[in-house]
Image: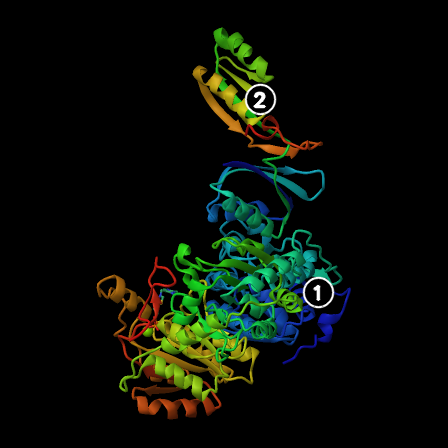
Amino acid sequence: MKVEASHEVEMKGKLITGADLLIKTLVDANVDTIFGYPGGAVLPIYDALYRNDTPFEHVLSRHEQGSIHAAEGYARVTGKPGVVLATSGPGATNLITGITDAMMDSLPLVIFTGQVAKNVIGTDAFQEADVMGITTPITKYNYQVSDVSDLPRIVKEAFHIATTGRPGPVVIDIPKNISANITLNDFEDDFYLPGYQPTINPNPLQIVKLAEALSRAKRPLLLAGAGTLFADASKELKQFAEKYKLPVTTTLLGLGTFPGTNELSLGMAGMHGTYAANMAIYECDLLINIGARFDDRLTGKIVDFAPNAKVAHIDIDPAEIGKNIKTDIPVVADAKKALIALLDSKIEMQNNFEWFEKLTKNKQDYPLWYERTDAPISPQWLIEQIYNISNGEAIVTTDVGQHQMWAAQFYKFDKPNNWVTSGGLGTMGFGFPAAVGAQLGRPNDLVVSIVGDGGFQMTLQELSVIKQRNLPVKVIIVNNEALGMVRQWQESFYEERYSESLLSENPDFVKLAESYGVRGVKVDQEADVIPTLQEIFAYDGPVVADFRVVRQTCVYPMIAPGKGIHEMVGVTK
Amino acid sequence: MKRIITATVQDRGGVLNRITGMLNRRQFNIESISVGASEVEGVSKMTFVVEVSDDQKLEQLTKQLNKQIDVLKVSDISDKAMVARELALIKVVSTGQTRAEIQGIITPFRASVIDVSKDSLIIQVTGRPDKVDALIALLRPYGIKELTKTGVTAFLRGQQPEQVTELNSLSI
Ligand SMILES: Cc1ncc(C[n+]2csc(CCOP(=O)(O)OP(=O)(O)O)c2C)c(N)n1
Ligand SMILES: [Mg+2]
């Protein structure tokens, strides 16, 4: 990748276009990849890209939703901000799902949208959309550039806001006259954001309180969310848990922040969490939440969530503390800083051997289970084979539905930042483009995209991108010929009235892949699963593999909506 | 409970939209918002009168306001010594016969007549919201043709007593 700025872009005091200035500011921000799609309002920017010899990688998606989910995947696995460029009107509105997704899951994105020229804004001009209005509630912040001299500062601010504190998406809307007009290249980019000063270091008094609570606890539990990943705090989390022998459960988005195979790990908690994790939440007397936001899919019925526990909550976003769950010990801080402070505290623990024994027994007595059949394939068994054959080291992206939950349950993530899924928004169509971004961000890692036959069809046009760039993404379709998760809810809560949830007219995914020039394989016998996985994981190119799985399989255990965390069904066969 | 929250905000495009949109989306019950310039250039002052069900909701409100990038400072001044004022313009039906009578009603409120026509008067009143409401109630029987209120704007008093009396703190 070319990351040095071309000579032309570097020259100060020279007359250049606003678009050239934008390219230069992106180079200054160390951007190495942008995900985009051209159109009228961004033609000056695309022209500047061309004239400046594309000083960073531009990835042309086949739909703007593909661009933004790819940017999310890229951001999630690299820790760097994902950068997106789209045109005005329909280009911008095609990004909305992804922007909302990034907002919900706190992903750092900087998104540039073209806008009609300033003199026609507000006249319903061709391809005009009120991007500021539309994106205000779904961004951490947004800007419309009204003076080109503000552009370098705005870009710098945007990267700062997107990547610090609680990360999130920032939109910069650029009217066409701003990018097209000639300007002098010597603007200031210093910025001052007096209203934005995230609290990084914990209040020592709160750490003392937490340490005291821990020293009194007989049944302590750590709950780790994605905040620990953003804070790069997985190492400290492990040290802390191991130092005091504290059992750990994670949220869906927190998977991998604590090794799934560690003896202290209880696995994922929540609606489809493990029995051991959910019962630990129900029975603990001290719950220490580090960087999770107590989402309702985690908590179930609020009154039954950790009913016997003192709750401590470490979060960089103070507004998350006390929002859903009453909190006794709030700690506003970066997760890593808070964990370091806790590791530095002297804590005399109670004997919690009994608690640990109980949890271990729960793990042994009530493991995740499934029924194994050989034709078609059991979906959970398929995930286990993916786990085994990739040595647990793949980057796994998923779409949304049953396959997502099975991936979360049966792929034991031991390392942070290898798990990419849409949690808060639950966006079907996320998984495959996210894999494109993940593979671009980590070219040397095996990227496996586990998708449903439904969701894959929402964004599969991105097959062109993996073909064009020969990105060796392995798409695993968990094909149950259904909108499986919907079908499951209809089975459980709507007396098996399968309204619009069966997909009997799926395409031939093998031929479909082949039409894009991508290798396609279909597997419908258990005996073929392992050899096929071995072969395609070793293959140096993209593959779409259509695995025919049992159609009726449901995800268990499950906490039905409105039920408490201890009221799981399907804990055993 | 009714609370008065003030916020100073950086004057940037869309800031009002961002804040009111957030309050609306998160289902906070806003009775009035007033916005205007402050003593610092580029900084505006917003005053919210809100109805919240409990302390937890109130805490959420101030936290969500504080979280906004453009918000510099949020204060709940409801329990402090403060002055809260609003302005109302009231166009009331009045013929020659009732004019003197209406004048008699508004004088104790230190309201003034700012426009007279054949069949109506426009009255301007400023003051504590309860006072403004009391005057409106008294004028209602004459027939109010048009009414507009600015919403409350509020300040802490220069001196904060040890104990805030009810008289100081309330009446909003
Ligand atoms: C964009 C979008 N539309 C609808 C839904 C609702 N929804 C959740 S899961 C699901 C079914 C997904 O089917 P599939 O992709 O085949 O995955 P499966 O559950 O069968 O594994 C649907 C429709 C959603 N999450 N996202
Ligand atoms: Mg399906």
Residue kind at label 2, given as amino acid type: Val
Residue at x 60%, y 55% (from the top left corner): A143
Instruction: Tell me the mark number nearer the camera, choosing from 2 and 1.
Output: 2
Q: State which quadrant residue A568 falls in.
A: bottom left
Residue B113: horizontal and vertical position, in percent? 58, 16
Judged from the image, the secondary structure of the residue bearing numbered disc 2 is strand
Report which residue position mark 2 lands on.
B125
Which disc, if any, is residue A16? Answer: 1
Which disc, if any, is residue B160? Answer: none
Q: Is residue A44 visible?
A: yes
Label 2 marks which chain's residue? Answer: B
Residue at x 60%, y 28% (from the top left corner): B85
* Mark 2, other Cα within 10 Å: few <14 / some 14–19 / many ≥20: many
- Ligand 1's image quarter is bottom left
- Callouts 2 and 1 in the same chain: no
Q: Is mark 2 within 8 Å of ligand 1?
A: no
Q: Is residue A168 visible?
A: no
Residue A212: horizontal and vertical position, in percent? 60, 60
Residue A393: horizontal and vertical position, in percent? 50, 84
Residue kind at label 1, given as amino acid type: Ile
User: Does residue B120 appear left or right of residue B164 in this picture?
Assistant: left
Q: Is residue A36 above or below residue A374?
A: above
Q: Quadrant of the C terminus of chain B?
A: top right
User: Does residue A270 appear left or right of residue A550 in this picture?
Assistant: right
Residue at x 43%, y 72% (from the top left corner): A358
Q: Is residue A44 above or below residue A192?
A: below
Judged from the image, the secondary structure of the residue bearing numbered disc 1 is strand
Label 1 marks which chain's residue? Answer: A
Q: Is residue A88 above or below residue A368?
A: above
